[in-house]
Amino acid sequence: MHCGRLSGQPGHEQGSGGYPNSPKLHRHLNRGIIAYSHMTGLRFLFLSLAAVLPLAAQRGDDLNFLAGLDEFDHIREMLPSYLRRHALELIDRRDHLVAQFATLDDLARRKAYVREVMTRDVGSFPERTPLNPRITGVLDRGDYVIEKIIFESQPHFYVTANLYLPKTGQPPYPAVLYPLGHELGAKSHSAWQQTLGSLAKKGYVALAWDPIGQGERIQIYDHDFEDSKVRASTTEHTVQGIQCLLIGDHVARYTIWDGIRALDYLLSRPEVDATRVACTGNSGGGTHTAYLSALDDRIQVAAPSCYISSWRQMLATIGPQDAEQVFPYWLRDGLDYPDFIYAFAPKPYRILSAIRDFFPIGGARQAFEEARRLYAKIGAADKLSMFEADDGHGYTHPRRMAAYEWFARWLKGEEDKRPEPEIQLATFADLQCTPSGQVVDLPDAETVFSLNRKRAQQILRPPLSPDDMRNRVRELTGFTGVSGPMALHPYGTLARDGYHIEKIVYESEPGIQVPALLFVPDSGGASKKPALVYLNGRGKAAGMSEDVEPIVKSGFVVLSLDARGLGETRASTEHNATDFDRYFGDFDNAMTAILIGKTMPGMRAQDITRGIDLLVARPDVDGANIFGFGKDAGAVPMLYAAVLDSRIHRVALEGMLISYDSVETHRIQRQIFEQVVPSALNALAPRPVWLVSPVNGLGHSVPATELRNAYAAASRAFKVASAEQQLHVKERRPGDQLFSVYADLVHVAAGSPRN
């Protein structure tokens, strides 16, 4: 599975070749531009232009000053390099530990640990409820039949599946659980049909089901387009993944549970021998082969295809893929791809790989060599195998043949060298289980969104003291405060009317250089000035005329910075294309950060606090009068910086996400993945706070009733602190002058001029 490239790009598995005779195909292939507009793409384009055009008029080229400085040629690789370096340190530590494993006891402990972490990361699994299976139709293929089945993995959470059942041979038959990848058509994809039909002809019962976001189980369905509103299933997975992460769950909670319940159904069939069960799938199906075999002892043989790799190689190549494939803190907790194998060992496991896959073949080889050593030490060397074919991503003929041979050896005790049989392909409609072709049209149908929303409403949120809230924010953001001397380098000064701008770069921590602009009023005298640290999501050169200049001319020293990943430090490489970037912000870096136990807002909050260190050290700054101003993507990091650093005495948060609850109530979000942590406004009381023009998960303005509900808890906290008047909730319309909204924020000394 390639979880990032847009459909139509070379190598993407969501191409047309596996979607036979579908009336939706051409409509899907032609809807790229339409979908972009439909999903607010044009609005996003206009916003981008609005962000760029004013800068040219404000001499933005002078303010973005790193261009042309040789030492900063690779500044846009700074954040990815930093994250990879920390990830590799964790991987090295894990590899050293695993190299010492040598016994079955070591293996048993590792297996228990892997399962514990996986179960914790998904947020625990639902309870087993009645499957309520029903067969909605049967296709007769001569020597096997295809049953069209609907079952409920959770109440009213419908799963559409096809069961391939042999008509020859003697039951009970060995069985194959077949989780699917992200190809168009899901269970109707030609490669899947070829595999499943061949297995049935070879005497296996095989079960495949539509994953969420695919086939008949599109979760964010558009009835006009007859397709997903967000086009790709991988994008659906990550949209839902964000919502799940916000309540401490993982989208794999749903996908893995679908697989476990599919296995429940498979083993309920009298035609199946429950002692002879294999699992295989390609890409996303390989992912779930690894997951299910690691967690469910009923699987006796496993053969994941085009998935097993190593994070060392993944981070050097394609990076993290969609949300179902990235467990939070996986590397921080000392785990890697081979640990899926250890959780299954010492049972028979074959890694199926493609030499020309975008999942790096070097990673698969590393994983195999590592696991092979332990299999050999425990006397099970013959039960671990790796098969490579010189081709690209997909469950191609060579890998299918390798799977048939592996299953025959371990489930039947025989060699299978027979040619792959020919099968008759069915259309999407032929294999359709629901009347309309979509489960969302079934009565009372649940979706990931609706189920996750219910779980969010059930979560008890006990009030936390300010100290407890700070500790919780520090823990969940991965914030690691840095203190001590800070390297600071000047890069020239620009004169302006009434003030000057110092162009500087400071080191937030080893490996992180923060370019910044220091705006200093020209007024003389020895008196210390109030200061403001400013973080604009569009970069340090943004907001000059509407925000920064009026504040400087009011007598403030202003530090405007490019926190890591913003402005001139925004990463130049995006493995997962603009589709993921459009919905999730800096996806690659955000996901890598989650792997190592960090978050984007937590790291950016640290850059802000180091900026405060810089201001406090200046003789012309009044350390008792330092304020914070975060705008758009800079608002959430500023919030957490203020929670964690009491030196920020007042804080303004403009264009900030209203709450993480708002993400749970909207099916689609934009630019969210950089902001996944709980809200913490309560901890700021009694300090003055300005909440200006908050937005929901789509970046849209919020109705007054939603504002009141979202900030009810914060209002109570400020009331308890006898600071009701210090929480300001306001709206700033286009063209509104700064002081019409923030008069009290900057009016800290009598006689401050307001220009």
Image (spheres, helix red, strand yellow):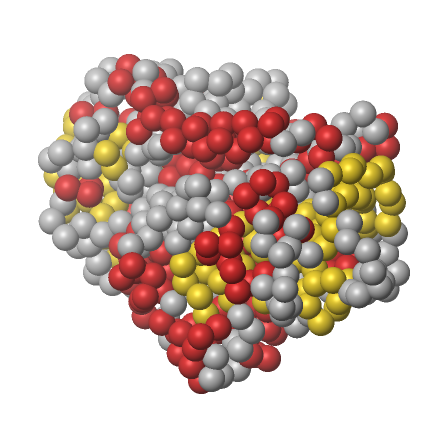
Please give the name of the residue rendered at 59% of the width and 49% of the height, measured from the top-left corner. 755
The residue depicted at 51 percent of the width and 58 percent of the height is: 742
* Residue nearest the observer in this picture, 536 or 595: 536
Give above or below for 206 relative to 742: above
Taking 116 as reference, is 429 left or right? left
Q: Is residue 361 above or below residue 595?
A: above
Q: How many marks?
A: 0
Residue 634 lies, in percent from the top left, at 57, 50
On the picture, is 379 further left or further right than 124? right
Q: Residue furthest front?
A: 751
Quadrant in the rendering for residue 30: top left
Among the 4 quarters of the image, the one containing residue 619 = bottom right
426 lies above or below 649:
above
Q: Report x, y in % for residue 611.
A: 74, 56
Image position, residue 603 (x, y; %): 66, 54
**Measuring 21% from the left and 18% from the top, which residue is drawn there?**
23
Residue 301 or residue 615, whichever sits in front: 615
**Residue sitting at 31 percent across and 66 percent down?**
709
Q: Nearer the viewer, residue 600 or 365?
A: 600
Asked if 256 appears above or below 49 in the picture, the reply is below
Q: Is residue 748 visible?
A: yes
Can residue 640 be seen here? The reply is no
Residue 567 is left or right of residue 664, and the answer is: right
In the figure, is residue 82 to the left or right of 658?
A: right
Residue 238 locus on image (x, y percent):
44, 43
